Image (tube, helix red, strand yellow):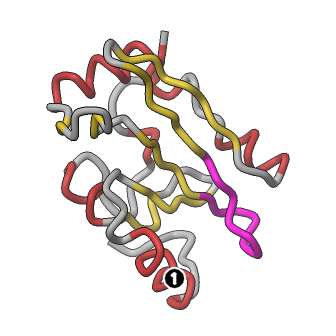
Amino acid sequence: MELKHPLPSAAIDAFHMMWGNFPEGVVLLHKSREVIALNKAADKLGVLKQGIKCSSVGTPEMHKGCLANKALAEEKATHVFMPLADGYAVGFWVPLEGHPEYYLHFSVGQTINYRTGEHRNPAELAQLFQKVAN
């Protein structure tokens, strides 16, 4: 799919070099919410694809807690705590230095329980998204 807001290939290469093997999903996005690139873990989940808008996935309620606009306006990383039955996850929105219309979005603890090393199943992730939205 052709991107409406492409980044230079050097920026995409840097994204994959830094985040390609991160154990949780990391997505590189344009402020329009267009998905520019995904790391291996995000791609493996099969929810997002390059070129679509992340906000088109799931229900509008799932995106109520999105802090992308805040992170981009303030030009600094922002985060949210997401309570889970066995602890919590932390979601991040991180603007790209030198590319003010782009940001990274990822979480730590969302797909992996780092206390036990177990991967959460898709049903648990769907419940997590619903909790965060409410």
Q: Is residue 100 magenta?
A: yes
Q: Where is residue 122 in the image (x, y as percent from the top left)?
A: 17, 31
Up-down relation of residue 81 to residue 18 (above or below):
above
Residue ID at (37%, 17%): 84
Q: Position of residue 100 (x, y in %)?
A: 76, 65
Which of the two residues, 3 or 41, is positioned nearer the viewer here? 41
Residue ID at (73%, 45%): 71
Which of the two residues, 57 or 92, is positioned nearer the viewer here? 92
- Residue 52 lies left or right of residue 94; in this view the side is left
Q: Position of residue 106 (x, y in %)?
A: 47, 48
The outermost residue toward the right is: 74
Q: Mark 1 packing: few (<14 Cα in 10 Å), some, or many (20+)?
A: few
Disc 1 marks which residue?
14
Q: Does the magenta stretch include residue 46?
A: no
Which of the two residues, 92 or 27, is positioned nearer the viewer here? 92
Write the start and end of the magenta stretch as one range. Answer: 93-103
Residue ID at (38%, 37%): 109
Q: Quadrant of residue 49?
A: bottom left
Q: In which quarter of the image is the N terminus?
A: bottom left
Q: Position of residue 128 (x, y in %)?
A: 34, 21
The outermost residue toward the top is: 134
Q: Kindly report the secondary structure that dominates the magenta region of the rendered protein.
A: strand
Kind of residue at badge 1: Ala
The outermost residue toward the front is: 115
Up-down relation of residue 48 to residue 5 (above or below):
above
Label 1 element class: helix
Up-down relation of residue 36 to residue 133 (above or below):
below
Up-down relation of residue 101 to residue 75 (above or below):
below
Residue ID at (50%, 89%): 9
